[in-house]
């Protein structure tokens, strides 16, 4: 029943909360440190993508707005 408070009930509840917390931490570690994409054999290595700011905002292609 909802009102049962026998000996060991608090300990069992605390154990359950800690077990769920540990499982959540393990899942977070797995998600953080495992690769999320499949490695293709012979794929190009990752490289730096350079970004450039235009010199003059008015010289953008497409004319003025």
Image: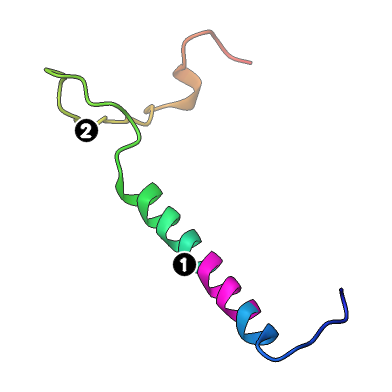
Q: Nearer the viewer, residue 63 or 45?
A: 45
Numbered label tally? 2
* Quarter of the figure that contains the N terminus: bottom right
Quarter of the image holding residue 7?
bottom right
The residue indicated by pointer 1 is 22
Residue 60 position, x and y percent, is: 47, 16
The residue indicated by pointer 2 is 48
Mark 2–mark 1 CB contact (< 8 Å): no
Residue 34 position, x and y percent, is: 30, 44
For residue 12, above or below residue 46: below
Q: Residues within 10 Å of mark 2 (few under 14, many from 20)?
A: few
Q: Main secondary structure of the magenta part?
A: helix
Nearest to N terminus: mark 2 or mark 1: 1
Q: Farthest top residue?
A: 62
Residue 28 position, x and y percent, is: 43, 55
Tell whether 51 sits left or right of 12.
left
Residue 40 position, x and y percent, is: 20, 20
Tell whether 47 sits left or right of 22.
left
Please tell me whether mark 2 or mark 1 is closer to you in this view: 1
Quarter of the image holding residue 20?
bottom right
**Real-space Cα distance between discs 2 and 1?**
37 Å
Is residue 21 found inside the magenta-colored segment of the image? no
Q: Nearer the viewer, residue 65 or 12?
A: 12
Q: Magenta region: which residues?
A: 13-20
Tell whether 49 sits left or right of 2.
left
Rendered image: mark on residue 62: none
Tell whether 5 sits left or right of 51.
right
* Quarter of the figure that contains the C terminus: top right
Q: Residues within 10 Å of mark 1 (few under 14, many from 20)?
A: few
Quarter of the image holding residue 49?
top left
């Amino acid at each position: 029943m909802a009102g049962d408070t026998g000996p060991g009930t608090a300990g069992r509840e605390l154990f359950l909360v800690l077990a769920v917390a540990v499982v959540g931490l393990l899942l977070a570690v797995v998600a953080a440190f495992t690769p999320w994409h499949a490695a293709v054999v012979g794929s190009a290595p990752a490289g730096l993508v350079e970004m450039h700011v235009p010199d003059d905002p008015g010289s953008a292609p497409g004319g003025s707005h």
